[in-house]
Amino acid sequence: RGLCAKVNALPDVYTTSSCSGRVSVFAEPTEETRAAGLKGGEWVFVSHERSDPDEVLAAVRARVLSGTRLVLRFEPFILHAEARGAEAARRMLQAARAAGFRESGCAFGQGGKRVMAGVR
């Protein structure tokens, strides 16, 4: 929230969406759930907040004995911002990359009228 407020205070960019990241454990569908007509699996644990490792492990332990295949995922921070133009987006990406967000990039939409910077 603090970062979004700082970005939104800049004159040439504003945030359009952001996520602080999340950790999740997903139980893949089993033969039984598929036979019952259920196509998807089940979220065993998911949080967008700082997670307690013991809480994550407890969720895993509760399901691992069932033989269900579990998938642990970590999705990192992401922030999208619209920039006034390519130069403003370039400056934002330069700062993001200097801070270690090396997968950051820029996208142009509506024939180049919208300039979006993605920090990740």
Image (spheres, grey):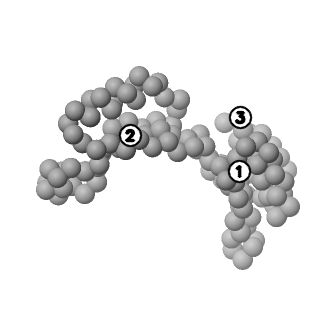
Residue 119 visible in the snapshot: no
Query: Which label's residue is closer to the chain start, 1 or 3?
Result: 3
As measured in the structure, the alpha-carbon distance from the residue carrying label 2 to the one carrying label 1 is 26 Å
Residue drawn at 28 percent across, 44 percent down:
69
Badge 3 crowding class, 10 Å Cα cut-off, few under 14, some 14 to 19, many 20 or more, is few
Q: Which mark is residue 102?
A: 1
Name the residue nearer the viewer: 68 or 1.
Answer: 68
As measured in the structure, the alpha-carbon distance from the residue carrying label 3 to the one carrying label 2 is 28 Å
Q: Mark 2 belongs to which amino acid? A: Val
Q: List x then y, in percent, for residue 55.
A: 40, 25
Query: Which label's residue is closer to the chain start, 2 or 1?
Result: 2
Query: Which label's residue is closer to the chain start, 3 or 2?
Result: 3
Q: Secondary structure at mark 3?
A: helix
Q: Secondary structure at mark 1?
A: loop
Mark 2, residue position = 25
Residue drawn at 37 percent across, 44 percent down:
71
Mark 3, residue position = 2
The answer to whether the residues at label 1 and label 3 have Cβ atoms under 8 Å apart is no
